[in-house]
Image (cartoon, rainbow, N blue to C red):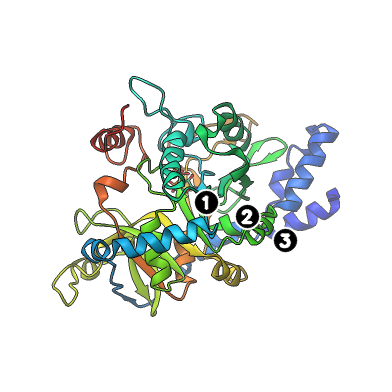
Amino acid sequence: MTLEKAKEKLVKYGQEHVLRYYEELSPEEKQALLAQIEATDMSIPEACKRKEELSRKGNITPLAAMEISEIEANKDSFVATGLEAIRAGKVGAVLLAGGMGTRLGSDNPKGMYNVGLTRELYIFECLMNNLLEVVRQADAWIHLFVMTSDKNHDVTVQFLKEHHFFDYKEEYVHFFQQEMAAATDYEGKIYLEEKGKLSTSPNGNGGWFVSMKNAGLLDLVHKNGIEWLNVFSVDNVLQRIADPCFVGATIQRNCAVGSKVVRKSAPDEKVGVMCLEDGKPSIIEYYELTEELMNAKDEKGDPAYNFGVILNYLFRESDLELMMEQNMPLHIVEKKIPYLNDAGELVKPESPNGYKFESLVLDMIHQMDSCLPFEVVRSKEFAPIKNKTGVDSVESARALLQENGVVL
Ligand code: UTP
């Protein structure tokens, strides 16, 4: 992109300030900045002017989950169906590892965190071990797609290679990078992180399928006959991946997506819960749940919005292709964003100073026609690591790993 064209684009979106150090840059840095300006979707920061409108919800009604008693009663049949699909190569797994893990506060990607006490046990290793259990049970390898971002790609790939993918078969592991989005101040002005670089951050976990497509991986999906993609987060070390019972139940119920859920520990627990929104499956965030919804009861007298999502979804791949054309809603998140001040010095703020723009995987559920919320035992399958200490932390996850017989 020429400087003239870049100026034109920046003026249109009120972002000319990002060129303020342009004359100080080397020719290569100038080229890099112009290329970044060309590649950046400048309409995104405008979303902060429509903040209210973006968070509006439709009409919320309950969506019943398949509860543990029902799952237990049908377990053999679900497992048989799931194993059959896995052996036929119809199931792939997608690890979302592009996040910044700012709450954990480690400089490395979250998956590289060592949760071991007397030995090394990395988060990536826990996940590989969990998936390997299914590989052994099915006696079939499962393609594993790993999403990284510009901020952590090289170090993630290098780490997994150095550790020989923790015994996972390398040819079944495929990396792809998610897209980045510009970060802004509260007025929607894009920050600079260097004199020749816009401040960017990963664009949320909702773009994973589009990013997989952009990376050319759908060819591999089609060639291998993969019909289901189990997408899961990096930070739940007890996560069951490609769980045959879950796969079988979703297939037998003929749902477009299955969603693993846990029974809430309290009505005001801070998890998103499954529901119907304007008649379609959806997830309502805890801060959107009104008192009335929080206390609503179903026909059995149980809380009507009682099942929280744990970021483990099984999507029918063909349905994902159909929804790709639809726009995902944007979420505007307040974050601490390192930036260059007026003196051209890098500032690392102690408290939030602006917005990041993200799309979220949970919004993909609302694009689907049907969803099976599938209850799992919390203490066996849910040990998220978000923080260093306290709730959802390294400490709480270690305790749960030990409770499940993992030597730390
Ligand atoms: P979180 O919402 O916990 O975000 O991600 P995070 O960036 O990892 O952590 P904080 O909020 O900065 O502390 C849930 C899952 O989605 C992935 C994460 O890697 C994690 O597996 N994710 C998140 C992405 O892959 N890309 C993103 O842009 C954001």
Q: Are marks 3 and 2 in contact (CB under 8 Å)?
A: no
Judging from the image, what secondary structure is the residue with disc 2 in?
helix
Q: Are marks 1 and 3 in contact (CB under 8 Å)?
A: no
Q: Nearer the viewer, residue 243 or 368?
A: 243
Crowding near the residue tagged with mark 2, few <14, some 14–19, many ≥20 C-alpha atoms within 10 Å: many
Q: Earlier in the sequence, mark 3 or mark 2?
A: 3
Give the residue pinned by disc 3. 12
Q: Earlier in the sequence, mark 1 or mark 2?
A: 1
In the image, is 399 to the left or to the right of 3?
Answer: left
Q: Amino acid at mark 3?
A: Lys
Q: Is residue 56 visible?
A: no
Say which of marks 3 and 2 sits in front: 2
User: Quarter holding the C terminus?
Assistant: top left
> Which residue is drawn at the image coordinates 24% and 61% (left, top)?
72
> Which residue is drawn at the image coordinates 59% and 45% (left, top)?
172
- The answer to whether residue 189 is above or below residue 328 is above
Q: Nearer the viewer, residue 279 or 16?
A: 279
Q: Are marks 1 and 2 in contact (CB under 8 Å)?
A: yes
Give the residue pinned by disc 2. 212
Is the shortest distance between ligand 1 and the CB of mark 1 under 8 Å? no
Q: Amino acid at mark 2?
A: Met
User: Farthest residue toward the left?
Assistant: 301
Q: Nearer the viewer, residue 298 or 7?
A: 298
In the image, is 228 to the left or to the right of 385?
Answer: right
Q: Position of residue 381 (x, y in %)?
A: 31, 47
In the image, is 130 to the left or to the right of 62?
Answer: right
Q: Earlier in the sequence, mark 1 or mark 3?
A: 3
Judging from the image, what secondary structure is the residue with disc 1 in?
strand
Q: Is residue 226 visible?
A: yes
Judging from the image, what secondary structure is the residue with disc 3 in?
helix
Give the residue pinned by disc 1. 94
